[in-house]
Amino acid sequence: MSLVEVKSVTRQFRLGQLSVRALDDVSLQIETGAFAALTGPSGSGKTTLLNLIACLDMPDSGSVLIDGTATSQLSESQLDRLRSRSIGMIFQSFNLVPVLNARENVELPLRLHALSVKERWDRVDEALDAVGLLKFAGQRPDSLSGGQRQRVAIARALAVRPRLVLADEPTASLDSGNAFALVDLMRTLNEAHGVTFLFSTHDDRLLGNVRDVIELRDGRITSRNAQSGTRVDRSHPTADLQEVPTCSR
Ligand SMILES: Nc1ncnc2c1ncn2[C@@H]1O[C@H](COP(=O)(O)OP(=O)(O)OP(=O)(O)O)[C@@H](O)[C@H]1O
Ligand SMILES: [Mg+2]
């Protein structure tokens, strides 16, 4: 069973008299362990698709299944649970809280989890270590570089040990050096810790090492260049993700 299955999804937006078909009969499967990039011109539907998979929005027709369960069948509290435990979302603008330092930002989503205080802070440190930011843990976002802020946002997404990380243009605000480093980091987290990634990007240069590239145009998938190997074999399935993210100290 696929981790994510999008079946004939259509999403339309109304702007006054105008109706925009942001997604038009899109079908897609993402397997556990995948590292897939969503690409396509501005307005092609990348954010709309990520928001639907993240359960932040619902399709007008068709369905989105996570682990075989249609998201439309879930109650609000089940959706909340899915969003807060299984899916990590990384936004282009990081969405960090400016008055909190890096550790506190990463800890924020864990407050919804039934963890002891020690478990919580251990997870925060693990996640910050996994993105190489432990020594910046006490700094607020405004004293971090764009690349470091984006890594805090990744640590925050990872700390909840999600099965799936969705990232919407995670490199858009970064210079090319930091953008490449960020994709390498996501790749390492995918390979070493089995985190499934689906991320959107405008930047073709970043796609050189990505084997699974899904192209959207005008709300339709026009190609998917998935070579064998996009499904990463793991000795430990990611179903319970008990060991993700781990870190070597
Ligand atoms: N909330 C909304 N209300 C109205 N129209 C919307 C809304 N969200 C998206 N759209 C429209 O749907 C289409 C797809 O938008 P989407 O944001 O998914 O594109 P995108 O591929 O992410 O673009 P970009 O690369 O610029 O981020 C666009 O035509 C956009 O104007
Ligand atoms: Mg977008």
Image (cartoon, rainbow, N blue to C red):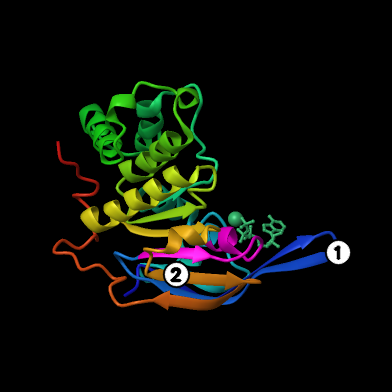
Q: Quadrant of ligand 1?
A: bottom right
Q: Nearer the viewer, residue 202 or 156?
A: 202
Q: Position of residue 140 (x, y in %)?
A: 44, 23
Tag 2's secondary structure? strand
Q: Please, is residue 40 above or below residue 143 in the view?
A: below
Q: Position of residue 113 (x, y in %)?
A: 32, 39
Q: Position of residue 14 (x, y in %)?
A: 76, 62
Q: Nearer the viewer, mark 1 or mark 2?
A: 2
Q: Please, is residue 211 above or below residue 123 in the view?
A: below
From where the camera sits, is residue 69 visible? no
Q: Please, is residue 181 above or below residue 67 in the view?
A: above
Instruction: Please check the rendered image and state whether residue 47 is part of the magenta-colored stretch, yes or no.
Output: yes
Q: Position of residue 154 (x, y in %)?
A: 39, 43
Q: Quadrant of residue 165?
A: bottom left
Residue carrying label 2 = 213
Q: Please, is residue 231 above or below residue 161 in the view?
A: below
Instruction: Please check the rendered image and state whether residue 184 is part of the magenta-colored stretch, yes or no.
Output: no
Q: Nearer the viewer, residue 11 or 136?
A: 136
Q: Quadrant of residue 29?
A: bottom left
Q: Dot 2, crowdedness within 10 Å: few (<14), some or many (≥20)?
A: many
Q: Which residues are magenta?
A: 35-49
Quadrant housing the N terminus: bottom left
Tag 1's secondary structure? loop
Residue 17, numbered label: 1
Compare marks 1 and 2 and give the one earlier in the sequence: 1
From where the camera sits, is residue 18 visible? yes
Classify residue 115 as left or right of residue 86: left
Answer yes or no: disc 2 within 8 Å of ligand 1: no
Residue 120, numbered label: none
Q: Residue at x 33, y 66 (%)?
A: 34
Q: Dot 1, crowdedness within 10 Å: few (<14), some or many (≥20)?
A: few
Q: Amino acid at mark 2?
A: Val
